[in-house]
Image (cartoon, coloured by chain):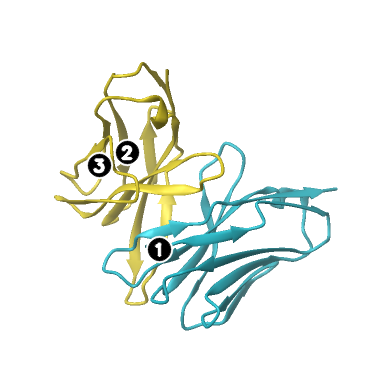
Amino acid sequence: GENVEQHPSTLSVQEGDSAVIKCTYSDSASNYFPWYKQELGKRPQLIIDIRSNVGEKKDQRIAVTLNKTAKHFSLHITETQPEDSAVYFCAEKGNTGFQKLVFGTGTRLLVSP
Amino acid sequence: NAGVTQTPKFQVLKTGQSMTLQCAQDMNHEYMSWYRQDPGMGLRLIHYSVGAGITDQGEVPNGYNVSRSTTEDFPLRLLSAAPSQTSVYFCASSYRLGGSGAYEQYFGPGTRLTVT
């Protein structure tokens, strides 16, 4: 079945550094790859997504890259700030009729001032 | 718009009890889903619905029932609660963005359930 591996499980950086989180998926038919941010005690919220016909997408300090051949995608956060501290989840959607997302296990990012 | 709402926010059950977690959305989204979130395991899909009257099982459906009589509501029923169902439950709604296969899931605030 569909599976998403996410690494690392925890990531600590200094404010201003860059952070990279990587996910690997198994379903070659997957065509949609969102990233969600979940602050402590809050609901997950979409921060950026990428479709299979695009290799990279950027939105201010965050970017996502997709390598379909290797079946992995990554979240890049530049100039990290303490408010970036949260748990980040990657997800992928297979090419089925329903938009069933499979989530990674999450990365806890801690940005120290 | 209130978005996606869930009740209750917290619940404690004894083993064997049953209850219903409520979920409602006012965005006229056709798709709705229930997830459970456990430490180190991410979000796992329990049940989902692609429209009123249509439901299907997700990754971890055992012990749960759902129904979708209206577009707005998607309750999750725990038939006989077990300690293994202690978790945070999130309801989500979404719509498809044209023909791209892309869409955004809007999550509710969650229900923290403890089964003793």
Circle 2 sits on which residue?
B23
Give the left or right position of residue A74, taking residue B8 as reference: right
Residue A6: x percent and y percent? 58, 59
Identify whether B52 is placed above or below B20.
below
The amino acid beneath tag 1 is Glu
Circle 3 sits on which residue?
B73
The picture's colour for chain B is: yellow
Circle 1 sits on which residue?
A2
Report how many numbered discs are placed on residues in the image.
3
The amino acid beneath tag 2 is Cys
Give the left or right position of residue A72, taking residue A3 as reference: right
- The answer to whether marks 3 and 2 mark residues whose Cβ atoms lie closer than 8 Å is yes
Q: Residue at x 14, y 50 (%)?
A: B53
Taking depth in this image into account, of B81 and B76 the one nearest to the observer is: B81
Mark 1 Cα-neighbour bin, 10 Å: few <14, some 14–19, many ≥20: some
Quarter assignment of residue A72: bottom right
The amino acid beneath tag 3 is Asp
Looking at the colours in the rendered structure, which chain would you say is drawn in cyan?
Answer: A
Disc 1 versus disc 3: nearer the observer = 1
Measure the C-alpha gap from mark 3 to mark 2: 6 Å
Quarter assignment of residue B66: top left
Identify whether A93 is placed above or below B43.
below
